[in-house]
């Protein structure tokens, strides 16, 4: 890009850290073998992948074996939302999200309506924020899960997910196992890691960007 360009769209995408780029280049030319192969080259590739998974697991305080690697954010959205909805359809077909969600999310919600799911689209307030009372009111006995973006990729608005969830819990309207939070633009925020390491036990991520700019964090629905 031009040297005089002022880039203000970091909530959507960021430059790759030069250290990450260099490591990716190194791995691309030295660890190209199938990590499942038993020969020396395969074992080297496996070791590099295992080390990277351990780093991510340590950052998020999760078992590296519990990580689900995807090709990108859209695949992660589809995996978390459509996968959970279809798997637990017998528990109910009501799902909740916001009208200001990323297109990767709204598209999968629209697709689910064609499969018989009912979607409640929560309106943001005048500041683009999720109103805890509106969120709680949208939840029903047959609500399977809710999906909310942590940081909006277009406006940069940071949702107070903790406040909304706490309000709903206090009113008996939500189980934390049924919350899916999209952190695609939340890398670098201290509260992001706080969420990952405390309230919610299960997380999955897309891993196509530097660890310094984590693109996705999930709290998928359990079968229970």
Image (tube, rainbow, N blue to C red):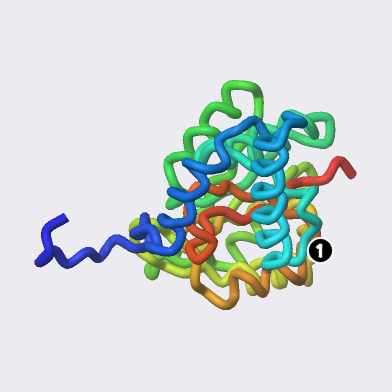
Query: Quadrant location of residue 88?
Result: top right
Residue drawn where x is 77% and y is 68% of the image: 199
Query: Quadrant location of residue 84?
Result: top right
| Residue lying farthest to the top in this orientation | 115
Residue sitting nearer the eye, 142 or 19 = 19
In percent of width and height, residue 146 lies at: 65, 50
| Residue lying farthest to the front in this orientation | 40
Vertical side of 92 occupied by 202: above or below: below
Residue drawn where x is 42% and y is 56% of the image: 22
Label count reads 1
Residue sitting nearer the eye, 206 or 47 = 47
Q: Label 1: which residue? A: 172
Q: Quadrant of the N terminus?
A: bottom left
Residue drawn where x is 48% and y is 34% of the image: 107
Q: Is residue 6 left or right of residue 143?
A: left
Query: Quadrant location of residue 14?
Result: bottom left
Vertical side of 59 occupied by 39: above or below: above
Residue drawn where x is 83% and y is 30% of the image: 90
Question: Label 1 crowding class (10 Å Cα cut-off): few <14, some 14-19, many 20+?
Answer: few
Q: Quadrant of the C terminus?
A: top right
Q: Is residue 129 left or right of residue 83?
A: left
Residue sitting nearer the eye, 177 or 36 = 36
In percent of width and height, residue 150 lies at: 53, 62
Q: Secondary structure at mark 1?
A: loop
In percent of width and height, residue 167 lies at: 70, 71
């Amino acid at each position: 890009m031009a040297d005089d360009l002022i880039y203000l769209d970091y909530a959507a995408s960021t430059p790759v850290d030069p250290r990450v780029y260099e490591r990716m280049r190194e791995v691309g030319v030295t660890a190209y073998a199938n990590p499942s192969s038993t020969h020396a080259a395969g074992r080297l590739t496996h070791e590099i992948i295992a080390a990277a998974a351990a780093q991510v697991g340590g950052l998020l305080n999760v078992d590296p074996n519990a990580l689900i690697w995807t090709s990108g954010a859209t695949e992660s959205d589809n995996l978390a939302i459509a996968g959970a909805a279809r798997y637990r359809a017998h528990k109910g077909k009501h799902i909740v999200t916001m009208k200001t969600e990323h297109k990767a999310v709204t598209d999968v919600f629209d697709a689910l309506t064609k499969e018989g799911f009912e979607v409640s689209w929560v309106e943001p307030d005048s500041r683009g924020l999720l109103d805890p009372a509106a969120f709680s009111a949208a939840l029903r006995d047959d609500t399977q899960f809710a999906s909310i973006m942590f940081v909006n990729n277009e406006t940069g608005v940071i949702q107070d997910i903790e406040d909304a969830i706490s309000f709903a819990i206090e009113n008996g309207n939500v189980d934390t196992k049924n919350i899916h939070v999209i952190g695609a633009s939340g890398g670098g925020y201290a509260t992001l890691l706080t969420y990952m390491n405390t309230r919610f036990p299960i997380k999955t991520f897309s891993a196509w960007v530097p660890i310094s700019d984590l693109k996705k964090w999930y709290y998928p629905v359990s079968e229970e």
